[in-house]
Amino acid sequence: MTTIGIIGEGKMGTDLFYFLLGFPLRLCWLVSPAADLEKIQKTYTRKVRRMLENDLIPEETFNKMVSGNLLTKEPFEMKECDLIIEAIPEDREMKQAFFSQLDTICTADCIFASNSSSFLPSLLSPSSERAHRQVGLHFFYPVALKNICEIIVGPDTDQAVIEYVKGFLKDINHFAILQTEENPFLLNRLFLDLQNEAFRVKREGILDVRQIDELIVANLIPGGVFELFDHVGVDVILPSIRNYAEMSGNPDTYAEMIRELEQMVHQNKLGRKTCAGFYSYVPANPDKASEYLPPGKIYLDLALYRLHFALATPARAIIDKGLMTKEDLLFAVKEYLGGEEIQIRIL
């Protein structure tokens, strides 16, 4: 049986572990030294027991899940893994340290994969020997509902490794989007210019954040730019934005947006988790009169044209460069944003 290692007990690591439970795999989940392993173990046992009690799994599968899968704080327990997927915070030095430690523990055949949304696999590889078996596997949250995964391959990645991870994704019913380090993280970078243009419109005072998000949701994609930043966390998304700006070859284009995000992090305006971001999440005073003034149609039309152009231009470039077909891009964007039922306007 294939043994898959998961590193990290954050939102993505936890979600990926529980998603993979539904497949015939042996799992080894490595959590941080500071994690409450006993609590994590109890939660896991309770969840799989509930699956048994609701007749979702037979008793034999329950027993295999409880005894066959391993939850641990000890990196040496990963020594038998065939594939390890790292899902820790977006910190390059922390990721490099993990892979360097695992390189001394795991077999030479083990494939190292990072769920990083912005670091190239060649930057994380601990050695020239391991570089042949290092990839990016960028899943999207929640894994069970986002049926896509970006495979980022470095210049030294073996073709056999690429075929292996493609087969793994096929086995877990995920659509693979193969990308090189010259054009990585296409889905997140696709929206970078839209996000940047939204910040420009806000700075110019044409519309406020709520009006911009409403315009985007009504006409382009089912999610506002500023809503997304608040939901993910400004501090979480900022490092990725910095990396995408560098990858663009013209980082100065995004300098104003990055400065504003840095200022918000400094002020602890991180979004929902601090109850303050681009929106306020403190209950409004019902006695205060609304200050909302609907903008004129000419302002809405101008802003919509700019936002649509900022989204359509990189989408067309992806297709024209042959990085993805139009059909695959539309499918991936729909999965990325929430499913086949949504309406999107990216071209």
Image (cartoon, rainbow, N blue to C red):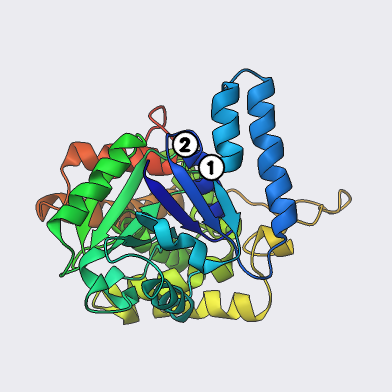
Q: In this view of the protein, which residue sits in the foreground, 4 or 125? A: 4
Q: Position of residue 147 (x, y in %)?
A: 38, 38
* Residue wearing tag 1: 68
Distance from disc 1 to disc 2, alpha carbons, whole Å, reads 26 Å
Residue 102 vs 27, above or below: the answer is below
Q: Position of residue 293 (x, y in %)?
A: 63, 51
Horizontally, is 258 left or right of 227 in the view?
left
* Residue wearing tag 2: 145
- Badge 2: residue crowd in 10 Å (few <14, some 14–19, many ≥20): some
Q: Residue at x 56, y 58 (%)?
A: 232
Q: Position of residue 74 (x, y in %)?
A: 57, 66
The answer to whether residue 270 is seen in the rendering is: yes
Residue 227 vs 268, above or below: the answer is above
Q: In this view of the protein, which residue sits in the foreground, 265 or 291? A: 265
Q: Quadrant of the C terminus?
A: top left
The answer to whether residue 88 is seen in the rendering is: no
Say which element carries label 1.
helix
Say which element carries label 2.
loop
Q: Quadrant of the N terminus?
A: top left
Q: Quadrant of residue 173?
A: top left
Q: In this view of the protein, which residue sits in the foreground, 197 or 57? A: 57
Q: Position of residue 73 (x, y in %)?
A: 61, 64
Q: Residue at x 36, y 55 (%)?
A: 83
Q: In this view of the protein, which residue sits in the foreground, 80 or 133? A: 80
Residue type at numbered disc 1? Gly
Kindly report which numbered mark, 1 or 2, lies closer to the viewer in this rendering: 1
Q: Quadrant of residue 185?
A: bottom left
